[in-house]
Amino acid sequence: MERPNYSATAPVPAGPKRNSLGLRIWHWASGSLVIFQLITILFISIIVKAKTLAPEFSKVLAEKGVTMAPDQVRGLSRIVAHRIWDWHIWAGLALSALLAYRVLMSFRHRGSQRTSAKIAHLQAQAAQGNAAARRGIWIRYAYRVFYVVLAVLVVTGLILVFEDYFRSIEHTAKEIHEISMYLVLAFSVAHIVGVFRAEVTDAPGLVSGMINGGESVEQA
Ligand code: HEM
Ligand code: HEM
């Protein structure tokens, strides 16, 4: 029986793809963890912020006839914050392992799976006056910058996890870790807006290519 065609593009080819299975697994696992990390910070710095939560808790307790000063209640909201930090640390360790996996994977990539081949392909198209390809080159370099920022977050994050051994640089690591968060936040927003825009303009099938792998790999 003939299967209905729900897709506007060609069927998925068999064999190795331009976006390797490893890259796709890395992308969706790391992408979700990065969003998760940003959400933990949103919760800690806004939603369960001890400073604003403690007076609210103490008001509700007073209505129930329990007198507890905001200072005493603060300890309770800190318990919640500690639990969120524990999640941040476990997700951070998983992100660190995934980054190591991404580095190892780059040695296994062949032909058009390699980032350098993807850039060379775009450069060839840009040389023929293709403006979208010229933009694509910048986007590829932005990915490289993102990997560096992610590595900085992982290194400084690990210093904070093992702070007992790094007392002298702990404060600096915390500041660098925090600044990197803003860069990752900016990248994530620009990237998600960018891929949605590309999908509906000059690159339909871009997002499904990060799910099904896209075109067959061309050996260089
Ligand atoms: C997208 C990734 C990440 C973001 C956006 C992020 C963001 C942050 C921010 C904003 C802070 C607060 C820093 C401060 O107090 O000034 C923090 C703390 C921390 N982060 Fe991350 N982080 C990420 C990844 C990681 C990774 C990969 C690790 C470790 C493996 C990690 C471990 C920690 C630790 C241990 C703390 C200190 C927690 C505490 O004060 O108890 N983070 N992170
Ligand atoms: C709804 C969310 C997301 C969608 C739909 C999406 C989609 C895509 C697509 C289609 C590509 C391939 C683009 C190309 O070949 O030029 C890509 C690449 C990439 N994405 Fe995402 N993405 C999402 C979230 C994220 C997040 C949160 C991160 C942050 C970790 C991220 C990091 C990356 C990186 C680093 C690449 C380049 C991979 C490489 O070739 O080395 N993505 N994404």
Image (tube, rainbow, N blue to C red):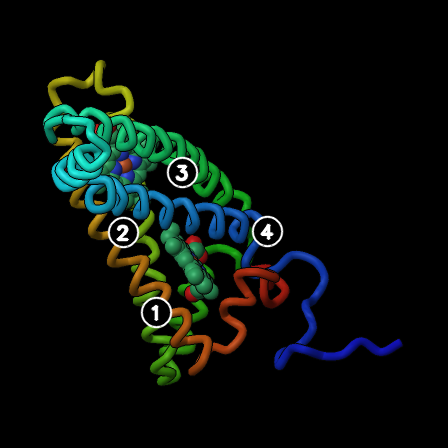
Would you name the residue on which mark 1 appears?
193
Query: Under tag 3, what secondary structure?
Result: helix
In the rendered image, the quadrant that contains the N terminus is bottom right
Would you name the residue on which mark 4 appears?
21
Q: CA distance from mark 1 to mark 3?
A: 23 Å
Residue at left offset 26%, top offset 32%? 81
Ligand 1 appears in which quadrant?
top left
Query: Under tag 1, what secondary structure?
Result: helix
Near mark 3 (Cα within 10 A), the count class, few <14, some 14-19 or many ≥20, is many
Q: Name the amino acid, label 2.
A: Val
The quadrant in which residue 195 appears is bottom left
Q: CA distance from mark 3 to mark 2?
A: 13 Å
Q: CA distance from mark 4 to mark 3?
A: 18 Å
Residue at left offset 45%, top offset 69%? 121
Q: How many marks?
A: 4
Where residue 162 sits: x, y (%)?
27, 20
Residue at left offset 27%, top offset 44%? 43
**N-terminal label among 1 and 3:** 3
2 or 4: mark nearer the eye: 2
113 with respect to 179 (left or right): right
Would you name the residue on which mark 3 appears?
95
Asked if the residue at tag 2 contacts the one at tag 3, i.e. Cβ–Cβ closer than 8 Å, the answer is: no
In this rendered view, identify the residue nearer to me: 169 or 136.
169
**N-terminal label among 3 and 2:** 3
In this rendered view, identify the residue nearer to me: 113 or 161.
161
The quadrant in which residue 120 appears is bottom left
In this rendered view, identify the residue nearer to me: 38 or 128.
38
Q: CA distance from mark 1 to mark 4?
A: 24 Å
